[in-house]
Amino acid sequence: MGLLSRYKKEKLVSEAYYKTIGQVDCPFFWQPVTFNSDGFNHLQFSAGNERDKPAQMLKFNLLELAPNIVKKSGTIQEYRKQWGTIGRKKTNGSHAMKEIEYWGLIAIVKNKEDKFIKIKVILRRVGTGNVIFWSVMPEVNIRRKDTFSLATGDITDD
């Protein structure tokens, strides 16, 4: 099976699964985190450009671990607040701006192959809106290594 056909299959399966999630209660926020179309779109695109197919497939494979991490996270490992553009440009060329908050939840969990992996789930809130799922990724610096292991058997080293 070629990369493109494998990608299409994984995307269909992941999208169907994603639509079943809806909302997940998060103990840190004392409110539900919404898994809406913005989050699934961000798994495929970044800054208006499509992510490459292997990167999307990696995110699709990690997706099923995200709701459980959100459900069990009572602490936040990363936080960022910034101003960002919202929506499309107006006719005069300006953009609406709002404060955007991001939270990172990092966990070591078992994957489908029963191996320990370290992943990060990103949550996002625009202005005073709802907290939504934004992304999921391995918690490693992929750019600096040709190969990597997501976590060792001994979590005290990670």
Image (cartoon, grey):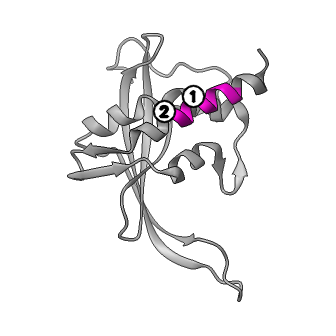
Query: What's the residue at 43%, 47% (across, down)?
Result: 35
* Kind of residue sitting beneath label 1: Val
Residue at the limit of the structure toward the bottom, as seen here: 92
Q: Is residue 18 magenta?
A: no
Of 142 and 85, the residue lying toward us: 85
Q: Secondary structure at mark 2?
A: helix
Q: Label 1 neighbourhood size at 10 Å, few (<14), some (14-19), many (20+)?
A: few
Query: What's the residue at 21%, 45% (across, down)?
Result: 27
Residue 17: give its label.
2
Vertical side of 27 occupied by 137: above or below: above
Query: What's the residue at 44%, 12% (across, down)?
Result: 115
Q: Are marks 1 and 2 in contact (CB under 8 Å)?
A: yes
Q: Main secondary structure of the magenta part?
A: helix
Of 39 and 85, the residue lying toward us: 39
What residue span does the magenta drawing correspond to? 7-16
Reading the image, the residue beneath label 1 is: 13
* Kind of residue sitting beneath label 2: Tyr
User: Count the marks: how many?
Assistant: 2
Q: Is residue 9 magenta?
A: yes
Residue 139 makes an appearance in the image = no
